[in-house]
Amino acid sequence: MAEIIQKDGSWVFDGDTLRLTPGRDKNVGLLRRTLGELTVPLQALAGVSFEQGRKAGRLRLRLREGADPLLQATGGRLTEPHDPYQLVVESDRYGVAEYFTDEVRNALLLDQVSSDPVPGYLLPGPSVPLSVAAGDGSASFDGERVRLEWNWKTEDAKSAAGARVLALAEITAVEWQPAAGLENGHLRFVVRHAPAKTPAKYDPNAVELWGFKKDPLMALVAAAVQARLPHPAASAPAVDGLPALPGPPEAGVAPAPAPEDDHDALLRRLRELGELHRAGVLTDEEFTRAKQAVLKRM
């Protein structure tokens, strides 16, 4: 087990999962505090890194594309205080952070976890029901319907029709865009047969965001809806003659068994492990354990 505890939060790795708990420091963003503890399976990771700084460093997790509905909905636009996959590390804990990084990397290597996109979400997304008020309105989601209500700052052209209720079956996509500079952000729901997009200020299917404290919480609503929409890989088109990624298996249908490992591929794997051992990436014990696992499959 590897563990690092900081004011910014604590990360614990047991070999199979990472448990990310936000700290109580004033610099921890509202979204991270509201989201609470996250449990991330090893199979959802594409990588981990640790970056040292003069006063503080950062641990960063990189998730596989399509593994987390929060990242899918926000498109990597979460800023540092709100990003649950970053941890600020004090300089006197750099050694602990490096050990933590090595433990996660070794587990990814030994389990041969691919960094390729995944065909289905590996994290569940925020729990429902939830409701957030920010910008020119509020958004609520109970797992089946989204309800948008307006406040006194909403443009008359948008608020005239009253509250908006969208069934999940009507929604084809969700967009979350934070305010940046002079540009306002938005939480928008793309609905079947809706007219062409209009600015969020006038769009009855969007809440306009102005860069205030609660804006990031709208990302939770976006992620909760995203988690219940068809996974993007299910409808991804083929590229350059390659087939699209498969969607999740239908209920009652067992997935096809994976093909047996090719003998040449296992030999290549042994050579790679040898190179990592000689380079000092793997210890003697780790190399022996990994080599035995490969030999058992030959």
Image (cartoon, rainbow, N blue to C red):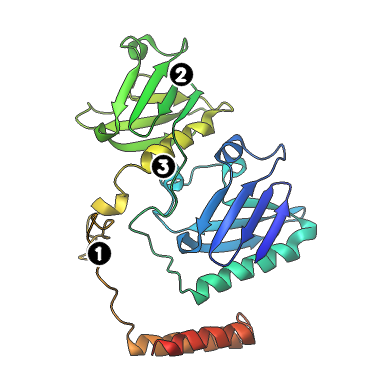
**Residue 55 versus residue 223: which sits nearer the camera?**
223
Residue 73 circle label: 3
Q: Quadrant of residue 158?
A: top left
Using the image, determine if residue 226 lies above or below residue 163.
Answer: below
- The span from disc 3 to disc 1 (Cα, nearest Å) is 29 Å
Question: Label 3: few (<14), some or many (≥20) within 10 Å?
Answer: many
Residue displayed at 34% across by 89% down:
263
CB within 8 Å, label 3 to label 2: no
Q: Which residue is mark 1?
A: 254
In the rendered image, the residue lying farthest to the front is 252
Residue displayed at 34% across by 12% down:
162
User: What is the secondary structure assignment of the residue under circle 1?
Assistant: loop
Q: Which residue type does callout 1 highlight?
A: Ala
Residue displayed at 51% across by 88% down:
291
Residue 8 circle label: none
Q: Nearer the viewer's eye, disc 3 or disc 1? A: 1
Position of the C terminus by quadrant: bottom left
Residue 136 circle label: 2
Q: Position of residue 231 (x, y in %)?
A: 31, 49
